Image (cartoon, rainbow, N blue to C red):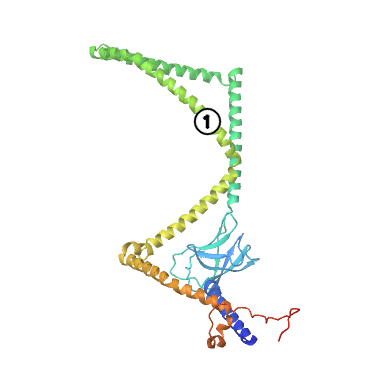
């Protein structure tokens, strides 16, 4: 094979590989978005932490564009974020953009669906809602707890002063004693009236007790009193044991909750992240279940259409037969590649004209030089 032919084949192979590589890059990458028509919108935020160029823009969790620029708004304050939206996506006039920020700092802009019939015009300016920092919420909660504890402390001090004033009043006879005496007399009068009512009730009770039937019932009640007293004693003992057990449980609970209180901030942060991931996973699982169980979903079609299962079974059988038939072809390709590796000239024109056995040629033999031995004469 001449060197010019070899260079031509190598160049042809390089061009073919470059074409295939470019085709695969264009097919499997998102380069086609460069030619996709878009329109721009301006969104004003008081603050936009985590937003940068190419930050995703979504509606109902589906990407509809990205951020193309960020500028400071010296006139209104804050920042103005310019976003590019796919031309096929039509937003409503009353849609509301909101900045979403995760615990890891990743940000995205989420549009609400909106309910207006009028579409949003290209180049419109919207007011966006800034994201709330989760760590700021935890900080506010800590401040609220501090204020609550301060209020409890102040209330305790007030009650302490009230108790001190009451003790001072009782010890030093301060206050209006006449009013106290009058109120005591009135209370005694009320107590006298109450005792009179009680006497009348006792008289009525005596009449009731004089009834033989009531006396029999009373005797039964008195006979049951020792048993009731024993059950009451047992109940009190059980309650005492329960109180002791509750005291031990509260002590154990205090030992358990002590370390948790020290790590409450980190636990809240991790719990918030876990709940966010769980919500995202639940949403994705819901979307997958809705797609799979839909009327035209693959799972619904597979379970309801027996013809689909039979076609899949026939396809699997045909694939097994195809794999079995392709084994001789692979063997022939292996033999052919081995022959080409041994004799690469078979690929050229000379290889087509000149046959070969496919075996390596033996190395050329060197001519044997004859030497004359001493004492031997050749006739």
Q: Which of 156 and 193 is in front in this view?
A: 156
Apparent side of residue 346 relative to residue 310 in the rendered image (left or right): right
**Residue 56 placement (x, y as % from top left):** 55, 65
Q: Is residue 160 above or below residue 313?
A: above
Residue 123 visible in the displayed image: no
Total marks shown come to 1
The image shows residue 87 at horizontal and vertical percentages of 50, 74
Residue behind mark 1: 250
Q: As rendered, which of 366 and 185 lies closer to the eye?
A: 366
Q: What element carries label 1?
A: helix
Q: Where is residue 49 in the image (x, y as percent from the top left)?
A: 62, 59
Quarter of the view holding residue 329: bottom left
- Where residue 169 sits, quadrant-wise, is top right
Examine the rendered structure and indicate whether residue 61 appears above or below residue 168. below
Q: Quadrant of the N terminus?
A: bottom right
Q: Residue at x 56, y 46 (%)?
A: 268
Left or right of 308 in this view: 165: right
Q: Where is residue 3 in the image (x, y as percent from the top left)?
A: 65, 85
Q: Is residue 300 above or below residue 372?
A: above
The single residue placed furthest to the right in the displayed view is 374
Q: Toward which corner of the image does residue 375 lie, by quadrant?
A: bottom right
Observer-nearest of 133 and 350 = 350
The residue under the point 56% across, 48% down is: 270
- Residue lying at 30% horizontally and 64% vertically, measured from the top left: 306
């Amino acid at each position: 094979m001449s060197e010019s032919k070899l260079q031509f084949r190598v160049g042809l192979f390089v061009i073919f590989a470059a074409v295939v590589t470019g085709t695969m890059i264009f097919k499997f990458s998102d380069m086609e978005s460069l030619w996709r028509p878009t329109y721009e919108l301006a969104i004003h935020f008081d603050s936009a932490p985590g937003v940068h160029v190419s930050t995703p823009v979504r509606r109902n969790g589906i990407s509809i564009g990205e951020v193309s620029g960020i500028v400071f708004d010296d006139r209104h304050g804050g920042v103005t974020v310019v976003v590019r939206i796919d031309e096929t996506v039509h937003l409503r006039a009353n849609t509301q953009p909101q900045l979403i920020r995760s615990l890891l700092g990743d940000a995205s802009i989420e549009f609400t669906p909106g309910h207006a019939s009028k579409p949003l015009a290209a180049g419109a300016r919207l007011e966006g809602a800034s994201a709330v920092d989760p760590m700021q919420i935890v900080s506010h909660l800590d401040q609220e707890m501090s204020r609550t504890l301060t209020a409890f402390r102040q209330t305790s001090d007030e009650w302490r002063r009230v108790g001190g004033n009451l003790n001072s009043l009782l010890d030093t006879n301060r206050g209006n004693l006449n009013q106290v005496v009058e109120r005591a007399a009135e209370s005694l009068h009320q107590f006298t009236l109450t005792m009179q009512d009680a006497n009348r009730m006792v008289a009525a009770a005596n009449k009731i007790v004089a009834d033989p039937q009531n006396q029999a019932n009373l005797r039964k009640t008195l006979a049951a009193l020792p048993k009731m007293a024993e059950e009451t004693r047992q109940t009190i003992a059980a309650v005492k044991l329960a109180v002791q057990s509750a005291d031990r449980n509260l002590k154990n609970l205090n030992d358990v909750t002590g370390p948790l209180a020290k790590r409450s901030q980190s636990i809240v942060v991790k719990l918030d992240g876990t709940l966010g991931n769980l919500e995202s996973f639940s949403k994705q699982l819901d979307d997958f279940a809705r797609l799979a169980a839909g009327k035209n979903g693959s799972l619904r079609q597979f379970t309801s259409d027996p013809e689909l299962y039979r076609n899949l079974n026939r396809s699997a059988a045909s694939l097994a037969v195809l794999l079995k038939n392709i084994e001789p072809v692979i063997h022939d390709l292996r033999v052919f590649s081995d022959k080409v590796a041994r004799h690469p000239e078979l690929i050229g024109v000379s290889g087509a004209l000149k046959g070969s056995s496919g075996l390596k040629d033996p190395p050329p033999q060197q001519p044997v030089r004859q030497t004359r031995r001493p004492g031997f004469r050749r006739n």
